[in-house]
Image (cartoon, grey):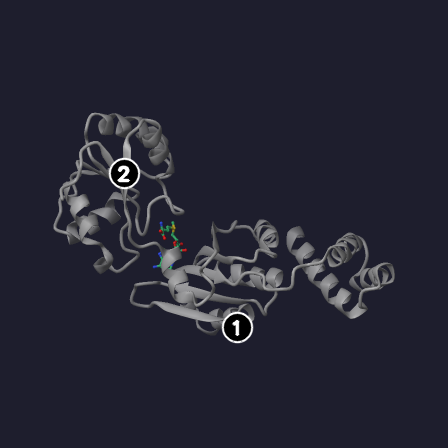
Amino acid sequence: MSIETGVLYVVATPLGNLGDISPRAAQVLGEVDVVAAEDTRVSGRLLAHLGQSAQRLLSLHEHNETARVPDLIQQLSEGASVALVSDAGTPLISDPGFRLVAAAREAGVRVSPVPGPSALIAALSVAGLPTDRFVFEGFLPAKSAARRSRLQALDEERRTLVFYESSHRIEACLGDMTEVFGGARRGVVARELTKRFEQVADGTLDELVAWLAADADHCRGEFVVVVAGDAREERTAESASVEKVLGVLVETLSTRQAADIAARITGAPRQALYREAQRLKNLQAGEDE
Ligand code: SAM
């Protein structure tokens, strides 16, 4: 089956192991008029591996996508076939291409997927955490305060959480997850998937922090972090209001004072309130950094 004219093909490429390119992806890349690539050097190496010419490569990245779109849509409307690829995995998944695909659909151009690798699905497929429902969060914010507040917003999410992370922030990211979700929550760190140094570590968040610290090599490369959803009992309205009272008190009082007063107001056990007050204080301290 040969490729069609006037179609934008969104082509997934390997995450690291070139053997993961599908025969159809190779065929489409070999036959289209234009290969729009996030980085022409990276995709040039893939085309060379496939024995294909790099002459049809056109760069399309975060910074030039808006400027490139009108011309590409024009070419597609005139019958050219275009393949969109990113450096690794599936385009648009934390990668460029959204503006081109949206504009193509708007212009009535057929957009056709050539599915294949994506780090988030590869990680989920081996994590051993529930996959019937999951949430893909992509990259967390780079700054700790913003990262913690994003994690805070996810604290009660019951679906499995999937994050992308780089080597620069993997330790800080796991540290913040431990702080916000609690060290007992289960997770998986999937590193360098499909590559020579692939590793998939599982355990509690506390154990994963220790695993990262145990060997500098554990922090190198590319990462997907998968975290179990919140498995605590549904919070009752009563426990929600206890938390609210404590949240207000820790803003101005010491941990002990806040726990004492919250215990008198709500009748909840002082020890549990003290631990919760400590957790809230730590979070506040992180936000003030
Ligand atoms: N579009 C890609 C996809 O479909 O997975 C993701 C692109 S995003 C810019 C790059 C991030 O994906 C990395 O920082 C890492 O979090 C994750 N990633 C990509 N390749 C990976 C691999 N081989 N192992 C683990 N994570 C990977």
- Quarter of the image holding residue 178? bottom right
Label ID, residue 207: 1
Dot 1 alpha-carbon crowd within 10 angstroms: few under 14, some 14 to 19, many 20 or more: some
Image quadrant, ligand 1: bottom left
Image position of 54 (left or right of 221): left
Residue 255 in the image, given as x and y percentages of width and height: 78, 62
Name the residue: 52% across, 63% down: 228
Label 2 amino acid?
A: Ser
| Distance (Cα) linking label 2 and label 1 | 42 Å
Q: How many labels does the image show?
A: 2
On screen, residue 127 above or below 139: below
Residue 273 in the image, given as x and y percentages of width and height: 77, 64
Q: Camera-side residue: 213 or 110?
A: 110
Label ID, residue 118: none
The mark nearer the N terminus, 2 or 1, is 2
Is residue 189 something one can see in this rendering?
yes
On screen, residue 3 above or below 282: above
Residue 203 in the image, given as x and y percentages of width and height: 50, 72
Label ID, residue 59: 2
Q: Between tags 2 and 1, which lies in front? A: 1
